[in-house]
Image (spheres, helix red, strand yellow):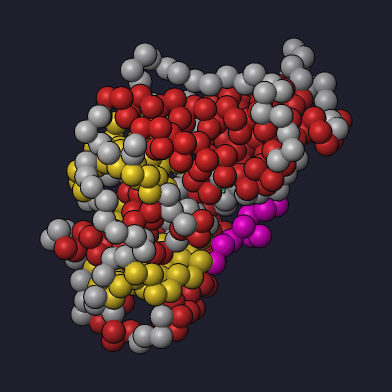
Amino acid sequence: MLTLGIETSCDETAAAIVEDGVCVRSSVVASQHDLHAEYGGVVPEIASRAHVERIVPIVRLALDGARVSPGDIGSIGVGHRPGLIGPLLVGVSAAKSLAWTLGVPLIGVDHVHAHLYAGLLGADRPAFPAIGLVVSGGHSSIYRMDSPTTLARLGATIDDAVGEAFDKAATVLGLEHPGGPNLERLAKGGDPEAHKLPISRLGKDSLDFSFSGLKTAMLYAVRGRPDAGGNFPRTHADLSEQAKRDLAASFQHACVSAIMLKLGRASDANPDCRTLLTGGGVTANTTLRDALRAFADERGLDLRLPEMRFCVDNGAMIAGLAHERLRAGLQDDLTLAPVPTTAC
Ligand code: KG4
Ligand code: ZN
């Protein structure tokens, strides 16, 4: 069966055609990075308008890319939570209209859970239960999964998501939005041990994350301590290129260490989980990918890392999880509504 997946939760308008939940026939992503760059973050109203303009051409490109016509589509999945309400509304409305017109099942998908499906695209089915790790711009969460559609959250960030921290650190270093990939580039050639930035542990058994302390420490490391009036003694422009590289590498090292610390705890507490599913924009980070591979090797875990193109937001992961939900009898009707928060 061919599933059309639609994704519009933030600043990517995306659509994909996936066959039987795993074979990606096409995947089209229109990023809005250029529209938001001058604001240093995503502006919801600008994002909504861009989704409205792009959604029909993007779905058409996905159909053309897979060399299929609308009548060949057997089901439609849409990321309907969590995200920005205006952007979500565009994707949900498009999915509902198409499902009603074509007379095919409509399946609402949790975007965060779909990130965990990204590593299963084009792959054989792993054993469950599994540990799931999502590290993205909006979420940093660890799950215990009994199947791709049955999951319980074990921990999540209590403040910023790790991708958000990367983006803020990049801004402080004078890099452009989106900061994650630019910071990673700058970190190459830097010394990860140059600055001892804080790695949050929280309670002894906590599987939650916290990145706000690291973010502040990074701000002070770049600009120095502010005076009583809140004025900083310097900016990134006063630093040498090597100093900036060292700061970027140290920040990246602290983020990856914090993620691996909590993953280790989760794996210790769930020894029956022999599979590790990962996803979200930050899994595109090479230092994190290397750390995850080393961790899985050491513990004999079956690691599923998404292909680079499926780390960030895309329609294929939505279509894949939608197919899985349909198989499990989890279908929606035309009352499906966008929801700003994740299901769990
Ligand atoms: O999954 P995603 O596309 O959107 C959300 O669901 O949030 O993730 C986007 C996030 C951004 O914060 C971006 O800076 C980060 O993923 N990111 C990276 C890298 N590529 C994307 N962070 C660190 N290193 C990267 N290579
Ligand atoms: Zn995402």
Side (left or right) of 73 relative to 177: left
Q: Is residue 339 above or below residue 238?
A: below
Among the 4 quarters of the image, the one containing residue 152: top left
Quarter of the image with the C terminus in it: top left
Span of residues in magenta: 30-39
Quarter of the image with the N terminus in it: bottom left
Side (left or right) of 121 relative to 87: left
Magenta span contains residue 190? no
Q: Is the magenta stretch mostly helix, strand or loop?
A: helix
Report the label total.
0
The residue depicted at 35 percent of the width and 87 percent of the height is 69
Instruction: Name the foreground residue: 200 vs 132.
Output: 132
The residue depicted at 27 percent of the width and 62 percent of the height is 322
The residue depicted at 26 percent of the width and 70 percent of the height is 20
Q: Can residue 273 be seen in this view?
A: yes
The residue depicted at 42 percent of the width and 49 percent of the height is 305
Instruction: Name the foreground residue: 13 vs 279.
Output: 279
Among the 4 quarters of the image, the one containing residue 166: top right
Side (left or right) of 182 relative to 265: right
Q: In this view, does 297 lie above or below 230?
A: below
Q: Is residue 56 visible?
A: no
Image spot of residue 222 (x, y percent): 74, 27
Instruction: Name the foreground residue: 43 vs 315.
Output: 315
